[in-house]
Amino acid sequence: MIASMNVIALLLVLQSSAPLSGQFGAIAQASGGQVGVFAQILESNDAAGLNEAERFPMQSVYKLPIAMAVLDQVDRKTLTLKQQVSLSARDLVPGIHSPIRDRHPVGGIDISVRDLIRAAIVDSDGTASDVLLRLAGGGPRVTAYLRGLGIRGMDVVTTEREMAGDPAAQYRNYSTPRAAVDLLKALQAGRGLSPGARELLLGDLAGSTPGPRRIKGLLPSGTVVAHKTGTDGTRNGKTAATNDIGIVTLPDGRHLAVAVFVKDSTETQDQREGAIAKIAKAAWDHWTAAR
């Protein structure tokens, strides 16, 4: 009897999510590229997706797992948030977004681990990200941390410097939309992080400044969105990555985790970001109306 009730509940979830997946597909047509989406209410199994098992280049989305792996090292006492890291000129990554590099073009500064995390998440600073990746032990260590959380379908491999020098390298730092939501679920649940580290990171994500027209773009003013974007430059009319993943707090206190990736688009930034915003709004409307 219990098994039958579970099957019925699952069928109801699938039926309620099917129209939403169709909306994702219709919206994606205007993006000019391949779109992957996964959205889930974290307090339940209610979810919907589009190409959710496909691989997409993360770009700066990968700063989130890097920051989590560094905070894990802090929790393990192998690093401290107050620990100072010396940055020389060779640590400054050219050709990417990096306020740290722009403020200190010849290096010669000391910066705390805490400030590196804030710069990587809030400002999406590429120099900060590469230093954090080094502190975490490199891509294999960060990927091993993800596997320890039970997350498959997400690999951290290359640095910001490598991606700046070879645009094809970004495809090695990949995630599926489902894996990105799995990461958000782990963060929200506090798996792999202490309560203090979790609150620190969620606060930085909520204060992240890039991408105001993506997940947040069409949501009601004041909605709390803890998110991380990722963006490639446009080359020969094609943009490899326009992404946003985040945890949206719904009016009733539930949490909507959503990951939207737009790959290899030939459309404008307005069109790409507009698709992300409309997908997030469709998910918002679906699950707020359901209550």
Image (cartoon, grey):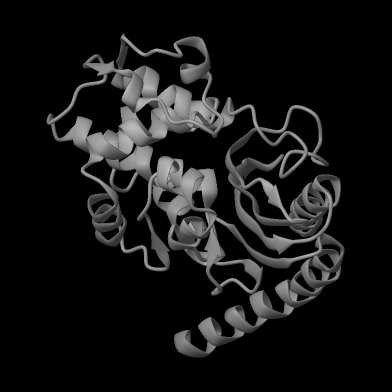
On the question of residue 291 being in view, the answer is no
Quarter-of-image position of residue 81? top left
Q: Position of residue 128 (x, y in %)?
A: 40, 28
Figure check: 172 above or below 187: below
Q: Which residue corresponds to the image point at 62% horizontal and 54% vertical from the top-left?
A: 258
Q: Quadrant of the C terminus?
A: bottom right
What count of labels does the image hold?
0
Does residue 114 appear left or right of residue 271 in this picture?
Answer: left
Figure check: 155 above or below 252: below
On the question of residue 249 being in view, the answer is yes
Q: Position of residue 170 (x, y in %)?
A: 49, 55
Q: Position of residue 12 (x, y in %)?
A: 67, 79
Q: Which residue corresponds to the image point at 65% horizontal and 75% vertical from the top-left?
A: 13
Q: Position of residue 241 (x, y in %)?
A: 63, 54
Of the pair 102 and 76, the residue shown nearer to us: 102
Of the pair 210 and 237, the residue shown nearer to us: 237
Figure check: 61 above or below 73: below
Of the pair 240 and 121, the residue shown nearer to us: 240
Quarter-of-image position of residue 46? bottom right
Figure check: 206 above or below 151: above
